[in-house]
Amino acid sequence: MGTIQAKIEGRVGESASGSDIVYTTTHMQDAFDHGLRAVIMAMPREAWEFFGKNEIDFLPIVGTPLTTDKVIRVLRKNGRIYRECVKIDSGKAGPAADSVSIHYASEFTPVYYVESGSFSNPMLKVLPDGDGSKIARLVCVAIPTVDITTDTIIPHFPDELEELPELYTVIWIKQREMGVSRRDGQTEIEAITDAGILNDLTAMYTAIATALGLVPAIIVEGSVETDSGKTEIDAVFAGGTDGMFDDFDTAMADVQTDLDNAIKILGSTAPVTNSVDALLVAAAATSPVDEDAIQYLSEDNLEHAGVAIRLGQARIQEAGTTIQAATSKVAEAQAELQNIDEHFKGVTQYFGLAGSFFKEAQSYLAEAQSWAAQAGIKLTECGVRIQTAQAYNQQSLAASNEAKQLQQEFDKKLGIYIARFQKEPKMVFADRRRA
């Protein structure tokens, strides 16, 4: 036959110190002792004779602490004979001790009563108390001492009732499983709500909101710089891409016209030069070629030559003016190119600022995305913990339902045994008591 512990573990479905229910042999022993006492205390007075007994001798004048209400009998020794005492109310103790009272308790008609203690167990006392040499005896139901790890039966306990303390212990273990599972589920929930995941998520959501809140203003600033850059571009491309350098092209066309005019003017001085040259050649033909050849030129010829020379100088001067105008136009073209360059520098500057603002906005968006990713991890953990808590709650509910079913079974069997014993005590426990 297996030990009581083995029988209990068989009904529980798991050994002590298992990984699921978490109960020990100490828990089991305590529950069994409590169940054994509960069964005995539930039995009617008629059944007390079938349980083990404690016999406590004491002096009537002193009394004895009463630790149980399962008093089978109280005796007072008179000579060699123990006479059974009759229970009276503690309020009648005075008359019972008065030798002239009709309620006086003699050695042949002893009584006992229970005197309540203020800070201790009640005291059971016997009358007459005698001279201090008399002996009284309390006979009460004994709660058996059982070691569930080694004992296979309950001493001084009817066979028919042995199942009940075991069943009581199983109920207690299931109730413990219910409590442990509920606590485990609560721990998962507290990890979310009590300074755990929920606080982390709150901080993350705040960080995300802060980062995202900075982006719109930065985007506006970037947009302002972008608009400024676009204004500079519009200044360059006012006439579209085809008219981008219209002012410059116009200036250069004017330069080309002035230069062409200067060339034409200079070209028109050639006949004047040729006329002077012809006069010099004619003079050389009529006179010896020497330093004084010029003196042979006629006065008319010199006059014609002077006119031609003055005309050529005037045209050369006119050509110089035209070239100067062309130079001025070149300067205008250069200034236009400088203006275009300044606009392009402005475009670069504004777009550079806009790019820095957009880059800053992108960094805040990346930060928000990072916090969102961490929040996602926490939410996943939160979901896992909730699922785990639900699993623990289901386990707790299952243990609770099983405990209720076992409690109904326990109550039913206990009620059956009590009813049977009250009707036919000897048929229930017929000589099955153990000494």
Image (cartoon, rainbow, N blue to C red):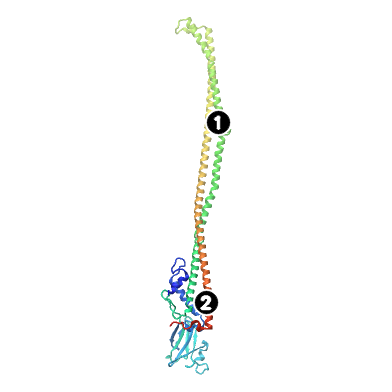
Q: Residue furthest top?
A: 286
Furthest residue to the right?
239
Residue 45 visible in this rendered orientation of the protein: no
**Position of the N terminus by quadrant:** bottom left
Reply above or below: 310 against 112.
above
Residue 307, position in %: x, y?
54, 12
Residue 346, position in %: x, y? 52, 37
Q: Position of residue 281 (x, y in %)?
A: 49, 8
Label drawn at residue 397: none
Does any portion of residue 403 appear in the rendered image? yes
Nearer to the camera, 116 or 178: 178
Would you name the residue on which mark 2 appears? 413
User: How far separated are the C-alphas under marks 1 and 2?
Assistant: 111 Å
Q: Helix, strand or loop at disc 2?
A: helix
Residue 257's image quarter?
Answer: top right
Determine whether 41 is above or below 173 in the image. Answer: below
Find residue 341 and report its horizontal and vertical position in percent. Answer: 52, 33
Looking at the image, residue 129 lies above or below residue 227: below
- Residue 3 lies in what quarter of the image? bottom left
Q: Quadrant of the C terminus?
A: bottom left
- The residue at 46%/71% (across/down) is 10
Q: Which mark is residue 245?
A: 1
Residue 222 or residue 190, whichever sits in front: 190
| Near-viewer residue (33 or 6) | 6
Q: What amino acid type is highlighted by mark number 2?
A: Lys
Q: Earlier in the sequence, mark 1 or mark 2?
A: 1
Q: Secondary structure at mark 1?
A: loop
Residue type, label 1: Phe
